[in-house]
Amino acid sequence: MGCQHRLYGQTPLIELRGLGIPEHVRIFAKLEFLNPGGSIKDRIVWHIVDQAERDGLLEPGATIIEGSSGNTGAAVAMIAAMKGYHAVITVPAKISVEKESVLRALGAEVIVSPAGTPPDSPRHYGNAALRIHQQRPGSFLLNQYSNPLNVDAHYRTTGPEIHRQMDGQVTAFVAAGSSGGTISGVGRYLKEQDPSMEVVLMDPAGSVYAGYFQNGVLDPAAIRPYQTEGAGKDHIAGCMDFSVLSDVIRFSDEAAFSMCWQLARQHGLLVGGSGGANVWGCVQLARRMRGPARIVTVLPDSGTRYLSKIYNPAWLDQHGITIGNGISRQQGKCPVPFC
């Protein structure tokens, strides 16, 4: 077994400038892609696995199973390799080739669910993980979408880190949500420190969260395909705590990916689609703010996991996605300074 020390967390938080927002508003981003597994999901997997070991739920050499859009799976595969476990990861068909390659490189058994599988189908990647767990005695299902330790990990680590790094001065926290762990855990912690602060969920067009927040009803008609990974859901995840939310902002793939390109070309930050969506949402919120404000978000993973998709002009053209913000998709000729 390899090193088993706590390696995650304590990631840098930087200010993003030059985003065309009012001068009285500042936007800050926490660089979660600098966790050792490459994403914010390291936090929840370490926390859940540590607790499972303390509770005697993981025997030496056991199998850890999880349904994931890729980042949680990568964290599971990494930690399983370090601790001598076997990892089985079920994933949706839209997972990027880079994410799938990472899973396989770390030794995980990867099972890809067919495209367009409805959430109630036994072949849906979430249901497939449960079925495999039931078929393999002694296995452990991480269950990120309903496991309260997902939220607890962010309540205990990400939230306090942001509060400390911002000297307790946070006007709003903005983040996309899929399992709901980040927005719920960080949002709950920060609102306990300052009940007046806003917690804003970013939700992709095609997800059910925005409609559920507004109407209290899950509308199957709202479900449609979208390309942003790690954001939104086709059902209500058990970890999503709507009571901490102040608002939900819908975003399009085009808005999220355009911001990804802007961050890369103008700020030297290569981030994934959910990070692009988060910053785009911060900009929309900033333009509403009448007085001084400090908005915080997270950049959950790196754009290196989406080079074949978000940063591939041919793929964007194939899916009819136009990059806006006046950003050229042509190869740059000179380096762009970090903000």
Image: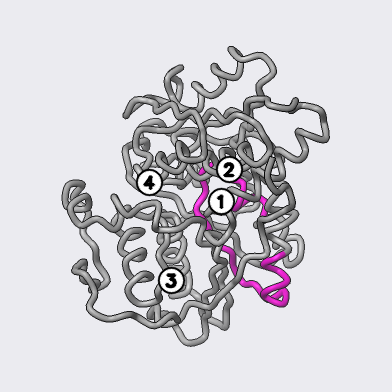
Residue 83 on image: x %, y %: 68, 38
Q: Is residue 246 magenta?
A: no
Which residue reaches farthest bottom? 23
- Given the image, on which type of amino acid does mark 2 rest? Met
Q: Which residue is mark 3?
A: 283
Q: Which residue is mark 1?
A: 37
Quarter of image, res 254: bottom left
Which residue reaches farthest front? 1
Q: Residues within 10 Å of mark 3 (few under 14, many from 20)?
A: some
Part of the protein shown in magenta: 161-185
From the image, state whether disc 2 or disc 3 is nearer to you: 2
* Local SS, label 1: loop
Residue 295 on image: x %, y %: 56, 72
- Given the image, on which type of amino acid does mark 1 rest? Gly
Mark 2–mark 3 distance (CA, rounded to whole Å): 34 Å
From the image, state whether disc 3 or disc 1 is nearer to you: 1
Ranked by sequence position, the earlier of labels 3 and 1 is 1
* Local SS, label 3: helix
